[in-house]
Amino acid sequence: MKIIDLTEEHRKTFFMCLEDWSEELKDAGDHKEKWYGRMKDRGLRVKLAESDDGRVGGMIQYIPIEHSSAEGRDLYFIQCVWVHGYTQGRGNFQGKGMGKALLKAAEEDARSLGARGIAAWGVSLPFFMRAAWFRKQGYRVADRQGISVLLWKRFTADASPPKWIARGRKPQTHGGKVTVTSFLNGWCPAQNMVHERAKRAAAEFGDRVVFEEHHTWDRDVFLEWGHADALFVDGRQIRTGPPPSYEKIRAIVEKRLRRMR
């Protein structure tokens, strides 16, 4: 195994989080590619894990914390560390140490760039980006927001811990119509899928449904609302991990419409 920087050769694979074989992920559109175009000159770093036979099996992406969903000083923020675990496509690479190797490479890189520490988000449940895994790698909990845990590792004695940015405005509703509100950052194909499915479902009901989208790669927009990626129907947040199907989102919207009759 070796850790490499992202190259033009592997960009398409990166834009689809190593699942370029997946038909379902085509629902994500080109939002991550556009996000990459905006962030590549703002400190975004990407590293890939390559197996001995040359297959890319893992990835990590991290950015200066001022472009993330947390706040801090002189820190980098890990948005995603992912080792492909499906038998389909490129195969299962989990359990081979790729995740730890990617994390170590990101930490060393962030140190070399002058960071005082590095932060990451995790979930308190045993799913993707498990907070417990980061704790095993020496990370400490800095803040919590529901099941989302903010963790960090200090590089220097004068480093200050990060914290989550507080929620801001609440999505508005429109009297007599169902309002679907989508917050889209672009960095995560899974959340990009949610956005595209919600947009398509809302359009099916014509002017009975209002679809509002907020692009949170714009820092001012994110700070106004406090949501990087989220979906609301009439002000009620819909769970988006794992991404709900188009049919499920459509059914939620249709149920709200029936209640208005």
Image (cartoon, grey):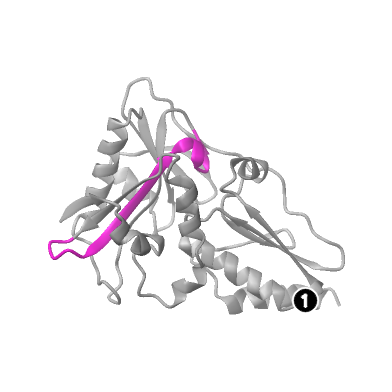
In percent of the image, x 58 and y 76: which residue is there? 246
Q: Quadrant of residue 125?
A: bottom left
Indicate yes or no whether the magenta region holds residue 14.
no
Residue 101 placed where, x, y %? 22, 49
Amino acid marked by disc 1: Gly
Residue sitting farthest toward the left: 52
Direction from residue 26 to residue 200 in the image, left or right = right
Q: Residues within 10 Å of mark 1 (few under 14, many from 20)?
A: few
Residue annotated with mark 1: 206
- The answer to if 57 sits in the magenta stretch is yes
Q: Quadrant of the C terminus?
A: bottom right
Which residue appears at 49% of the width and 53% of the height? 35
Q: Is residue 158 above or below residue 186?
A: above
At horizontal 71% and vertical 78% (from top left) the residue drawn is 204
Asked whether residue 242 appears in the rendered view, the answer is yes
List the single residue furthest toward the top: 158
Task: Tell me the residue at 47%/73% (across/down).
Answer: 26
The magenta span reads 51-71
x and y, in percent, of residue 252 in the image: 67, 73
